Amino acid sequence: MNQTELQIDAFAVAELLGLRRRGSRWWCPSCQTDTRHASPDLSIGRDGRLSCFKCGLTGNIFSLIMAVNGCDYPTAAAWLADATKDGTAYKGMLEAKSQAADHTACEIKPLTPAQRTEVYKRLLGLCVSCSAATTELWLAGKGLAGATLDRLGVRFLPAGLQWPVYRRLSRDFGLETMLAAGLCAESDDQSAIWPRGATFFRRGIPVLVIPYRVRGDVTGLKLRPIATELPADLPRFVMVGTGPLYNLDVLAVPPELDDAVFLCEGESDCWSLAQVGLNAIGIAGASNVAALGRPDVLAELRRREVYCAFDADAAGNRAADELTELFLRHGLRRLARVKLPDEFKDVNEVAQEAAA
Ligand SMILES: [Zn+2]
């Protein structure tokens, strides 16, 4: 068995092994297991040829697996076969798939809402609590506590769990389901299938997995990276499934118990309000006001006291005007605009101040 026959992408394998890189160099699994080493010294070619400029480790992709897993060749070969059978790193995957199922294989069959919810719930179940130290530290900067996010069903996916969790999901559900659920996507050149969060996973950046629910069904997930300084070339988040309205579940509670609802611009604002016991819906940015015009949403808003708490900036004010207009058009009268104190930009800043 050699690598060319397998069509294995060596970088993908290195990432599956949990190795980290900077530019074209990787931290060596033999001499740089301690990530405090300032600069990585291992070079890996796309074909798998490796050489470490520090300890002299050389060889091919199997040498790499043997070095990382501390195993012999047969075990490394078995590991590779196992790790790549789900297609995460197997370049021939799509071709094999289209041959297998009569030319129509690339048409991904859509999932039913129940199937989609099941996949999303499994991912959430494999993540950990937001009360983990990394999350708490990041949240503290926003005046938030992990327990607040835990209550809202938000989960945390630390760097070390990302690849194993996606491998496990791919194995349990199959890649077609992962694609249909939007958790995986084809690479631009259609040569491989990757988790949608791979852009964060490759850099070892932990993410929050934020469920978007409608009446208990998880209809979407947002992967939101946790980093004090997110590299400029990375997206702010990856949305999977249906957005943009966050925390719509608050409308599932009968209004006589909880008749006030705040409309704000994003998840952080919802969390800040939830932390002080207030119900809020996030619209994922000032440009999404129109999404609130859905008949089922309007029907529930009509039965409640609605407070608009958009950001105190030009976009937020425009969005608030648009919302007022939308409410008037549909005969909703009970909209109050929350005036934030002048020094605050959004609800989350008010929470930070309150926590400090
Ligand atoms: Zn080395």
Image (cartoon, rainbow, N blue to C red):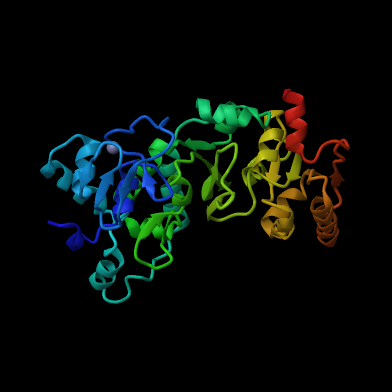
State whether residue 250 appears in this view.
yes
Name which residue lies at 26% across and 76% down: 102
Residue 162: quarter of image: top left
Residue 31: image x %, image y %? 29, 33
Q: Position of residue 276 (x, y in %)?
A: 72, 28
The foreground one among 158 and 36 is 36
Residue situated furthest top in the rendering: 356
Rendered residue at 75%/35% (across/down): 349
Question: Ligand 1 appears in which quadrant?
Answer: top left
Query: At which x and y percent is residue 298?
Result: 73, 54
Left or right: 244 in relation to 168: right
From this viewpoint, is residue 126 visible?
no
The outermost residue toward the bottom is: 103
Q: Nearer the viewer, residue 301 or 146?
A: 146
Task: Report which quarter residue 189 is drawn in.
Answer: bottom left
Task: Please indicate whether residue 173 sits to the left or right of residue 313 in the image.
Answer: left
Q: Residue at x 42, y 43 (%)?
A: 123
Residue in the image at 73% along x and 22% along y: 356
Q: Position of residue 179 (x, y in %)?
A: 40, 59
- Residue 136 picture quarter: top right
